[in-house]
Amino acid sequence: MLDADGTEAKTTYSDVSGTGYKTDAAALVTDRITGQIYLKALDDGGTVYLSYRINEWNDKGVVKSPYTHSNSDDYATNASLSKTAVAKVSVTTKPFVGTVSISGSITGEVGAAAINLDTSQDISAAVKDESGKEVNRPVVWEAMELPSKGIEITGNQLTFSKSGLFHIRAVCGTLYSPWVEVKAMAPSDFKSEETPIDPEPNVKSLKASQKTVYMPKGSRASLPKVAVYTKQPVKTDITWESSDPKTVSINGSTMFALKSGSAILTATAPDGKTLKMLVNVAGKRTKVQNVAIAKAPKKPIKVGKSVVLKAKIAPYNATGSSGAIITWKSSKPKIVKVDAAGKITALKKGKAKITATVGGKKQTVTITVKK
């Protein structure tokens, strides 16, 4: 067997069926039991050439071909042949069947250093096969808009040259994720949105919307959002740690459910304040049937007042497809803001809708604010 350049395959190949030689495209294998020779396609695909060879035997047990004239010491060899039959074989790979999805988003600064989309903690792509199992396959990121509009992705490195809203997606072979929106801001606006990080913010407490999370084995999810209450309005970084990394591991801002069991995740603030959350990994997935918001005020609340909303998941042990994690959102955060623990705060007169989402299920309540 020859590769696409006409070079004879000399790299050895072995599997449970037999042994032989291979190129990047295919392997020529001799069956261990039957002795039959067959061609096996490999993952990369490409072109190979099959060249006919004669057997080189003699009566002394040495591999030589039958002699070709009266001189019995003169044997024909493959090297002595001026021509031999050659067949060209094109090897195509089986198309991958599955889905590509994206979690998270990005807000970037115009003119700043490129953002590596493969390693970003703000956005990630997941590739799953047709059974729904996540697989390790590379993706290529691309932008919907042209570079002249202000966004460019080269080698999965994202840069912005103009401010605005753009769209990107992840591609795996012939599979495409949905487009997700990303934002680019001018340096002055970008910096004004950043809240300074206080290395010692005097954290009063850490709160989350739930104490227990259920995940299906083999899934991954973004770490739960945590509300950090400090004496001063400053941004605070927290770190996470798993009590059993073999059951639930943490990498960056993502947690992975590796096997059935339980692990306690601990979020720690710079000054030592902690929050613990139990993660139960189930052997099978259980759909979220419903989410209900409790303790929502039915009457208008005054500006400055805060209320903690509670979200209840049904069934309680639902895992969803990648973890039953509650998230909160306000339709008008300038009127009523809501944090990761479900705490709402009335900021000015008006109405806002607060939505709790988990496992594809949502419930919304309307909050009215009076002076």
Image (cartoon, rainbow, N blue to C red):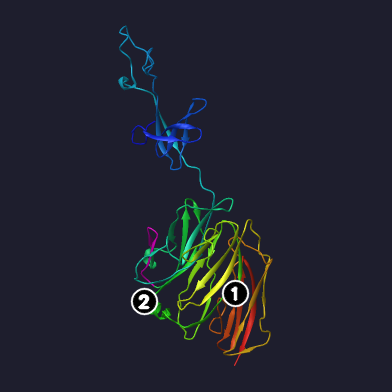
Residue 164 in the image: above or below residue 300: above
* Magenta span includes 159: yes
Q: Residue visible at 67% across and 67% down?
A: 316
Kindly report the distance in space between the C-alpha atoms of the residues bearing marks 1 and 2: 34 Å
Q: Mark 2 Cα within 10 Å, few/some/many (few <14, many 20+)? A: some
Q: Quadrant of the N terminus?
A: top left
Q: In the rendered structure, which segment of residues is drawn in magenta? A: 153-162
- Residue 235 lies left or right of residue 275; in this view the side is left
Q: Secondary structure at mark 1?
A: loop
Q: Residue visible at 47% across and 55% down?
A: 171
The image quadrant that residue 279 belongs to is bottom right
Q: Circle 2 is placed at which residue position? A: 187
Considering depth in this image, is 17 or 134 the residue closer to the camera?
17
* Magenta span includes 137: no
Q: Circle 1 is placed at which residue position? A: 209
Residue 106 screen position, x and y as percent: 45, 69
Disc 1 versus disc 2: nearer the observer: 1
The residue under label 1 is which amino acid type?
Ser
